[in-house]
Amino acid sequence: MNLQGRRVIITGAGDGIGRALALAFAEAGATVAVCARSRERLDSLSDEIAGDATKKHLFIAADLGKMEGVQAFHETVTKQLGQVDVLINNVGAILKSANFFELTDQDWEDSFQINLMSAVRLTRLCVPSLKQSACARIINISSIAAASPRENFPHYSAMKAGLSNFTVSLAQTLAAEKILVNSISPGPVWSKSWEDAAREQSNAASFAQTKKEIMAQTGKTIPLNRMGVPEDVTGLALFLASDQAAWITATNFNVDGGLARNPF
Ligand SMILES: NC(=O)c1ccc[n+]([C@@H]2O[C@H](COP(=O)([O-])OP(=O)(O)OC[C@H]3O[C@@H](n4cnc5c(N)ncnc54)[C@H](OP(=O)(O)O)[C@@H]3O)[C@@H](O)[C@H]2O)c1
């Protein structure tokens, strides 16, 4: 996929799917502007992307769970990158695995801010620039939990349902501007959040075994018989950003090894 010259924002890209997206888009010739809170993870991504010195990729420390963080990130991107062609609202997190009775108002509020408002705010700020692009795309990374909610993270499931829903209304609003808006809903993908959960259940000596067990157990529930890896999500995102996807908008795509089994 050749995305030479495209300028692409990817949020939450220090690890997991966002990091894989940053590497894949850079590999396809795009210039990427990414964020995460951890400077260390951004520096390691910067080292990994390296290569072509003509591509001035941006690695910006920002907290997108706060309005000021979104604004500061956008301001830096605008100053240093100018035009934006593709916005990938990837950042999101379960934050707390708990049932309805264990979740507080603050848990719901935190989930709202990071899983929905980060995308709403950054989209609002990026639309003027996207309007100037000949190949404008917004890709929201939702979750199969949007359509198949889980009782051990009802807040996250509800916010992802909001994000998928927002994708479709936004696609209608921006269709006249030729800004195409779609969402990708991954199934279980081994990433930092899964790794952190596995560490909580194990010690240094047993971590590898715990990871193997979680991957095997989760994989058994999936028709393709394995958990996803972050790179499983990149092919579809590259395609949606490309000229080949010029008549696709207002659509959600599951990338889940067949887990959701949604025929429509
Ligand atoms: N992994 C899955 O099984 C799965 C399944 C369905 C959907 N998804 C969705 O896919 C997206 C990526 O998930 P992932 O599992 O790949 O993530 P991950 O590995 O947990 O990585 C999340 C990234 O986002 C950054 N981040 C977290 N909170 C942030 C904040 N407040 N501001 C800025 N950056 C922040 C993290 O870095 P810092 O901590 O340094 O900020 C990290 O770089 C999310 O929207 C998630 O809901 C994931």
Image (spheres, rainbow, N blue to C red):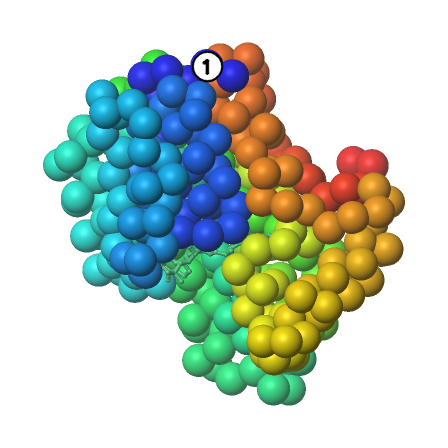
Q: Residue 36's spot in the image, x, y percent?
A: 34, 54
Between residue 7 and residue 245, name the one nearer to us.
7
Q: Circle 1 is placed at which residue position?
A: 2
Q: Residue 99's spot in the image, x, y percent?
A: 66, 80
Q: Is residue 1 above or below residue 253?
A: above
At a point 44% along the width and 72% down the height, the residue shown is: 109
At a point 51% along the width and 84% down the height, the residue shown is: 104
At a point 48% along the width and 67% down the height, the residue shown is: 111
Q: Residue 57's spot in the image, x, y percent?
A: 27, 34
Between residue 64 and residue 50, name the one nearer to us.
50
Question: Is residue 176 in sight in this rendering?
Answer: no
Q: Residue furthest left?
A: 79
Question: Is residue 76 in sight in this rendering?
Answer: yes
For badge 1, the amino acid type reads Asn
Count residues near mark 1 (Cα–Cα under 10 Å), then give few for <14, some for 14-19, many for 20+: some
Between residue 162 and residue 212, name the one nearer to us.
212
